[in-house]
Amino acid sequence: MGVALVLGPLLGHGQGRMTTTVVGAAARKAPAETGATGGTATLTGRISNPTTDSVAVSLRENPLDPKEKLYRAKIGEKGEFKLTIPVSGPTKADLVYGDDVAPLYLDPGTDIEARFKGNDMSGTLRFKANDVPTGLATKLRNGNNLTDEQRHRQQGANANNYLVEADAQFVENDGFQVLPDNIQLYEAPFLSFLEYRRKHEFEFLEDHAAKQSFTQDFYNYAHAEVVYAYANDKLTFQDLREQVVNTEGRLKMAPDYYNFLREPGLLNDPNAAMSELYHEFLLNYVHFAVAQDHHQRTDPDFYPASYALASKKLTGPTRAIILGRILQESFRFGHVKQSAAMLADFRNYDPKNQYFPILQSDFDQHKEFAIGAPAPDFKLPTASGDTVHLHDFAGKLVYLNFWKTTNGLCLRDLAYAQEMMRKFEGKNIAFINIALDENEQAWKSLVTVKKLPGVQARVPGGGLRSALAKEYALQEVPTYMLVGEDGTFLNTKPKRLSSRAAIDEINQSFGKASTYTSAIDFPATKK
């Protein structure tokens, strides 16, 4: 697979016991299976010479919730352990032992044993099915007389052994990765690299499928990981290379480079719904398509345009996940009123209320500091003996600098701050520097000696524990924020004063608050 296999529930089709045997390429286009939902997966194990006292399985129960659920078991005197994990369907998880992590595939009915050496889990990990006859003589005697439960357990062991081997073959091998070396290639050799990797990954999968029994759901998942590792790396190559190879300009791609995005079924593939690489590709596709339509990330309508495009282009259960991902981006980087309107519309795509509570909680967590949220007013003493309020600068762009005289990084930025203020002298912007020093005299002395320009104010007491620091959610200094002419947050993480891009960013921010206001209207989408 092109990148490390990611955590998360494998949502979509196939929610129960699977006993279909998948052999070779004949299964590639078969639909995912369906069945009863809910159940448990059992993982037992034995560790030779364990180096820690516990082992765990971690998984994410919801693809929009970053929190992982951890199931932990004590390791016995003989190195044995047992875990029973509730799963609602096919689920990608991780086996965690000390600092080592290995991929797991679990579904209802999984009952497997893991064995490995305590000092080398990744290099020695193997799985076998519990309570399934083994050995050549036993297999010949039983033939195909395994029960459905036994066959499913064997398929679970086969799936997890495949993941371990694929991880060693492709993920841990830098030669099959885009970073750090292959990203520096030009278009033709990069495409050759992708084709070479995809060919070997498919051969690896088909060779294992021909020799072993996989469930249809697992085969679909493994197949999708190959397809969308290729598609995602091809889609993001131009942008990623521009970021990494900063000694060259942006590559100009061949006219037909992006034609692969028109392939039928690439965007809406129900057999790929389990793969988070598929989800990642879809999100990157939406960003790409919106940018092609001349909407940049810094534009006020970027996230509404992304949401509208995804709601129109995508279908099936994956659509709600991608819309949720777009909303989570908007909560952090978009306008608060646009986010609220899109969140209300999202209910149309989440009839079972599977994702909305998580998104609502995420929105509530970020709304106070989102673009368009009112910046808390303040009343602070200045170095010159006056009092300053934020509302004194209504109608002006405001650059807030929270700093301390005892912080080396803050002191280093002083020279850049003075130069920045000179560049914007006479412009409709105010630079307010708010010190969080406990020592008032030391602060006043530095401001006087250095002849620091701009408004120099100080929080009277409490520093990072003060009420103002809590209102602005300050955790460290220096912290910079841009407030629009209307008194609302424009950017809570602008470029640092020492950054060359800071000047361009400020120039682009003049009048942007009103531009956002005029772009707030968000028409409801239709399913």
Image: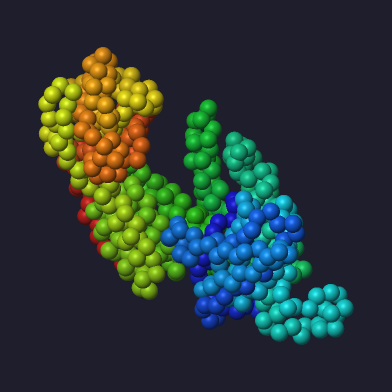
Question: Quadrant where the C terminus lies?
Answer: bottom left
Relative vertical location of residue 253 with respect to residue 363 in this rendering, above or below: above
* Residue 415 visible at all: yes
Query: Which residue occupies the foreground of this view, 155 or 439?
Result: 439
Q: Is residue 163 left or right of residue 507?
A: right
Q: Which colour scheme is used?
A: rainbow
Q: Which of the 4 image quadrants contains residue 328? A: bottom left
Query: Which residue occupies the foreground of this view, 35 or 393?
Result: 393
Q: Position of residue 403 (x, y in %)?
A: 30, 30
* Residue 95 visible at all: no
At a point 62% along the width and 60% down the height, the residue shown is: 54
Q: Which of the 4 image quadrants contains residue 181? A: top right
At a point 81% along the width and 82% down the height, the residue shown is: 143
Q: In this view, does 481 lie to the left or right of 288?
A: left
Q: Position of residue 397 (x, y in %)?
A: 20, 33
Relative vertical location of residue 428 with respect to residue 526 in this rendering, above or below: above
Query: Which residue occupies the foreground of this view, 63 or 72?
Result: 72
